[in-house]
Amino acid sequence: MMETLSSTPEAICPGHEESKIMESSKTFMRQMPITPGYSGFVPYLSCQGTSSEDNMAHCLKIFQENTQRYKDQLEEFHCSVAAAPKLKPVRSEGTVLRTLHQYYRQYHPLSLECKNIKKPLHEPPIPGWAGYLPRARVTELGCSTRYTVMARNCYRDFLDLVERAKQAHLKPYEEFR
């Protein structure tokens, strides 16, 4: 391929005068070593100031040195891991597999919770109750809780407000009667 690029334009396209003008510039043809996968990004090169070929060569050299240092550290790490003694297992492989299968059966996302666990009713329904819950708008009383728990929290808060309202009308000496 280098031989084709260095040959004369007439040898590539005989009879075309325009091909003499189309010579590759120095910035287009990179000198060896070429970083595999290099697409034009220059690491460590600031966008401010003038960018020259010397700055780019220096930045690419720093990048290649850092990459090589990282590869050397990784190789050293792999050697130290391979040289380390193997640890003894705490449990046997059968016990671990049995526990994993049990966990899989118990907590599989496709298994419906209502098939496995039936939640008991906390209290019997109130006769004549139409379902209205005081203070059950978008509050922390009903956030991510079951309906029965939310109802209990709302009623407790409502009764607490009623008690405070009753005591607010009393004078301090009337509270202790």
Image (spheres, rainbow, N blue to C red):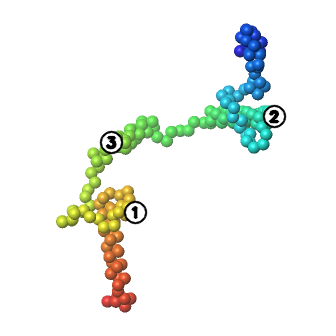
For the question of whether residue 76 can be seen, the reply is no
Above or below, comparing residue 90 to residue 6 in the picture: below
Residue 130 figure quarter = bottom left
In the rendering, at what x and y percent does residue 44 appear? Answer: 73, 40
Q: Position of residue 165 (x, y in %)?
A: 34, 79
- The residue at which mark 3 appears reads as 111
Locate the N terminus and report the quarter of the image it occupies. Answer: top right
Residue appearing at x 35%, y 74% in the figure: 161
- Check disc 3 and report its element: helix, strand or loop: loop
Q: Which residue is mark 2?
A: 54
Question: 156 left or right of 64?
Answer: left
Residue at 78 percent across and 25 percent down: it is: 26
Task: Name the residue rendered at 76%, 28% in the picture.
Answer: 27
Residue position for label 1? 140
56 with respect to 117 (left or right): right
Count of numbered badges drawn on the protein: 3
> Would you place residue 111 above or below residue 39 in this image?
below
Given residues 158 and 71, the one toward you in this image is: 158
Q: Amino acid at mark 3?
A: Ser
